[in-house]
Amino acid sequence: MMNARFMYMRPGNLYKRFTIEENRQVVLDDGRMVNGHAGDGTRFLKGCLAEASPETKERWGQLGHQVSHTIVQPGPAGAKPGDRLVLGGRKFLIEGLDDAGGLGIAVIYYAREMV
């Protein structure tokens, strides 16, 4: 019989290490304010990456946010909306998050992959 802990595990669904780049607003020489992401490579989070369900995409789309993926991290939140997560050559902009259960046990990040 299969162990219940691994029932939903599939190849590639294990924890991945994402680099966190914080969202910082920068004022350009002409006075315009733009968002920029920067990180020194020392902040990380480990989470499971999955494509967002059609229901999740629709729900977030109705709120004005395009979501393509979810990232589930055990423990309290390590990043915030507006931050960018980098995984190899892929980049994900965090559109929102959900403290699953409100107990700080796990966080679900709703993100849009930047192409």
Image (spheres, rainbow, N blue to C red):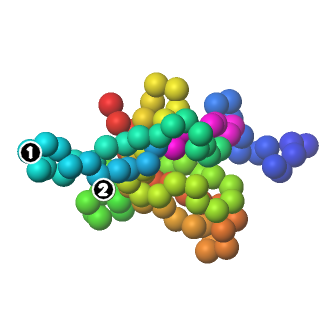
Residue pointed to by mark 2: 65
**How would you rate the neighbour count of disc 2 (Cα within 10 Å): few for under 14, some for 14-19, many for 20 or more?**
some
Q: Residue at x 65, y 44 (%)?
A: 46
Disc 2 element: loop
Q: Position of residue 115 (x, y in %)?
A: 33, 31
Residue pointed to by mark 1: 30
Which range is magenta?
A: 13-20
Amino acid at dot 2: His
Which mark is drawn over residue 63?
A: none
Q: Position of residue 94 (x, y in %)?
A: 42, 51
**How would you rate the neighbour count of disc 1 (Cα within 10 Å): few for under 14, some for 14-19, many for 20 or more?**
few
Q: Quarter holding the N terminus?
A: top right
Q: Position of residue 24 (x, y in %)?
A: 35, 50
Q: Position of residue 36 (x, y in %)?
A: 31, 43
Disc 1 element: loop
Residue 53 shows in this picture: no
Q: Is 15 left or right of 115, judged from the image as shown? A: right
